[in-house]
Amino acid sequence: MLKQERADFILRRLEELYPETPVPLDHTSPFTLLVAVLLSAQCTDARVNLVTPGLFALADEPQAMSQLEVPVIQEAIKSCGLAPKKAKAISGLSHILMEKFDGQVPRTLAELETLPGVGHKTASVVVAQAFGEPAFPVDTHIHRLAQRWKLTSGKNVVETERDLKKLFPRESWNKLHLQIIFYGRDACTARGCDGTVCEICRTLFPKRKKGIETKKS
């Protein structure tokens, strides 16, 4: 198959496998989603979903969060990785939201990326899942699968995102990035498949004998 043919097959098959794509992180607003995504760095979604109810019981909007002391936030999220750094970021971005954005989460990537602890991937998730703006957040699962499926030769998530956006229709991005994540967790895992085991890898590359080593993001 040509690269575009592989992309078209993947889009069809993932739609069959995952017709529904619930957002993995529990949230009730753009702000709680922003905080949850920030917490998910080097932490599983399941762990974040265990931690956020306690945090959001203390504060679930910028004004209340900005009034909490950083040690209080840190204590609430201590079971997540990098808790001290994340607590400072949550406090800092809450103050900035109050001071510069009238207590509202901004809707653009550029504005979101000015907030402490918010990189391109976090901002992309927020604009896609909170505001429905087309974005293609690339995490380690997507980076790994895109390489196994030869959709990119990118050495990092920035290059992978660029290549995937060229291959898939813009209207599919928000749903597709979740579908790829789900498939990467369920079938084409880091250790369970090396590019020769799961259904999609075997379908796309039936003659492949040697596993694919992922270039680190």
Image: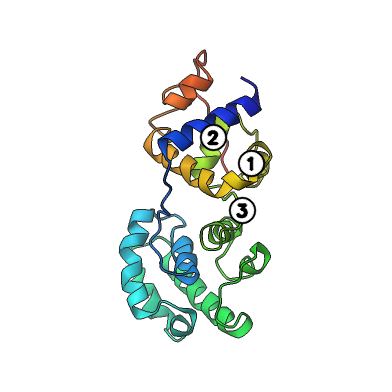
Residue 44 position, x and y percent, is 38, 53
Quadrant where the image shows the C terminus:
top right
How many other residues sit within 10 Å of disc 1, few (<14), some (14-19) or many (≥20)?
A: few
Q: Earlier in the sequence, mark 2 or mark 3?
A: 2
- In this view of the protein, which residue sits in the foreground, 45 or 83? 45
Which three-letter amino acid code belongs to the residue tagged 1? Pro
Task: Work out how far the residue at label 2 is from the one at label 3, CA to CA, in angstroms.
Answer: 16 Å
Task: Work out how far the residue at label 1 is from the one at label 3, CA to CA, in angstroms.
Answer: 10 Å
Name the residue tied to disc 2. 11
- In this view of the protein, which residue sits in the foreground, 186 or 117? 186
Which three-letter amino acid code belongs to the residue tagged 3? Pro
The residue sitting at 58% across, 36% down in the picture is: 215
Which three-letter amino acid code belongs to the residue tagged 2? Leu
Q: Quadrant of residue 101?
A: bottom right
Regarding mark 1 in the picture, which secondary structure is present there? loop
Name the residue tied to disc 1. 169
Q: Looking at the rendered structure, which numbered label has been put on residue 134? A: 3
The residue sitting at 52% across, 16% down in the picture is: 208
Q: Earlier in the sequence, mark 1 or mark 3?
A: 3
- In this view of the protein, which residue sits in the foreground, 85 or 53? 53
Residue 205 position, x and y percent, is 53, 19
Task: Work out how far the residue at label 1 is from the one at label 2, CA to CA, in angstroms.
Answer: 10 Å
